[in-house]
Amino acid sequence: MRINIPKDHPRAESLRIREKLEEGFEKGLVASAGLIAHGRGEAFDYLLGERTIPPASQAIRTAAAMLLTAENPVISVNGNTAALVADEIVRISKSAKAKIEVNLFYRSTEREIKIKDRLEKAGASNVLGVSREADARIPELGSERCCVDSRGMYTADVVVIPLEDGDRTEALSKMGKKTIAVDLNPLSRTSQKASITIVDNIVRALPTLTENIKDLEGKSDLELERIWKEFDNTKNLKKCVEIINKRLTRMAKEAN
Ligand code: ATP
């Protein structure tokens, strides 16, 4: 049900994001489990203060550098991602010369086509992974997410995996691919297994990623490689947990 969200509502932005997901659900892009996954993300966003924290900014810059040096980068898109940031996905795909591939946990050709249509409406020209085009398999992965496009994720060197599950992140790493996750939960298996984890809301992280790609475009491969080779994901995640911890400790003190 749509309501008129007052501009000065303290949770206006969060409600607007929910509304996009509800709309995506009604149109058949988002799976019901996607709504639940969003709730988990929201809870962590609350703990982070609903802002892009400094370790996330560092991870975003590192991700931009990695994308610019990739030979065959691919962005994996699920229902929530398409409903929330389709325009931004297309922008990143153009600026980083990355392919876009649909990949769903709850797979159905109907939903894949709807997601493809949404991406094309946003300006994408060649969306991979739909139906039989997902002709290759990620080894050792049980879920439907193992089906990938041989022109895309199967042969990619760098895969952007927003809102991913841990098993697939691990399986992609085992195939020798570098992974860039966007996940508000620094404790999730995805966050722990990815090469770079951006602990931020996808609606904030992706526009910043586009800006960083533009900013780094003129740099040499050597400079760009240095940026991502120096990055330590485990340390970065630790900083995110410390920020949550400090915030909660301060709030607990204030409550006394
Ligand atoms: P894992 O298998 O990695 O431990 P999970 O089972 O907790 O993950 P899923 O339900 O598969 O997670 O995926 C949802 C993940 O996406 C959650 O970790 C959640 O924090 C994150 N998430 C949800 N919405 C957003 C969002 N808007 N921006 C960033 N992250 C989000």
Image (cartoon, grey):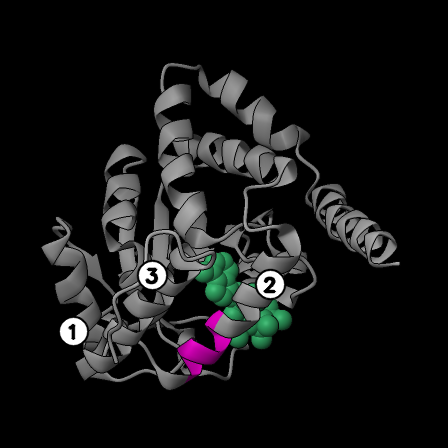
Q: Which residue is mark 3?
A: 16
Residue depicted at x 42% and y 28%: 212
Please name the amino acid that badge 3 sits on: Arg
Taking 137 as reference, is 161 above or below it? above
Residue 204 at x, y = what percent?
43, 45
Pointer 3 residue Cβ closer than 8 Å to ligand 1: no
Pointer 2 residue Cβ closer than 8 Å to ligand 1: yes
Image quarter where the N terminus lies is bottom left
Residue 92 at x, y = what percent?
30, 40
Taking 231 as reference, is 246 above or below it? below
Question: How far is disc 1 from disc 3 in space, using C-alphas?
Answer: 25 Å
Residue 85 in sight: yes
Q: Which residue is mark 2?
A: 190
Taking 199 as reference, is 230 above or below it? above
Q: Nearer the viewer, residue 170 or 2?
A: 2
Q: Nearer the viewer, residue 198 or 252?
A: 252
Frontmost of labels 1 and 3 is 3
Q: Secondary structure at mark 1?
A: helix
